[in-house]
Image: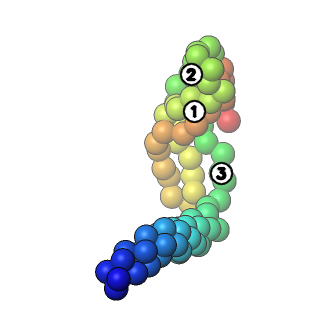
Amino acid sequence: MVAGGLVVAFLAGAPLTAVAAGHMVYDVGSRTAHAQQATWRQVPAVLAATAPASGFRQYQVTVQASWTAPDATQHAGTVLAPRGPGPAAR
């Protein structure tokens, strides 16, 4: 009788515990993402290559670019760009 009660309690409590844990993880992740995004600043980038003009259902493509951060440091890397602009486009 006691074992049956424990099984029922576990079967009822496990999904509720899982949902509560999921909400906690989501809240922590959301706060972390919000804190990171609060420090982001959008700056203009100069494309180093031509973005392809056509493709399969893509509005943006990845292109090599360079940019200057708000603290005046130079950066280079891959950015998303709309299809079609050529080198030195912003």
The residue indicated by pointer 3 is: 43
Q: Residues within 10 Å of mark 2 (few under 14, many from 20)?
A: some
**Looking at numbered disc 1 in the image, what kind of residue is underneath it?**
Leu
Callout 2: SS: loop
Quarter residue 90 falls in: top right
Task: Using the image, tell me which numbered label, if any, was put on residue 50.
Answer: 2
- Which label sits on residue 12? none
Pointer 1: residues within 10 angstroms few (<14), some, or many (20+)? many
Q: Nearer the viewer, residue 28 or 49?
A: 28
- Of the 4 image quadrants, the one containing the N terminus is bottom left
Q: Is residue 31 left or right of residue 14?
A: right
Q: Secondary structure at mark 1?
A: strand
Reading the image, the residue beneath label 1 is 47
Q: Distance of mark 3 from mark 1, alpha carbons?
A: 13 Å
CB atoms of marks 2 and 1 within 8 Å: yes
The number of callouts visible is: 3
Position of residue 56 relative to residue 75, above or below, is above
Specify the amino acid type for callout 2.
Answer: Thr
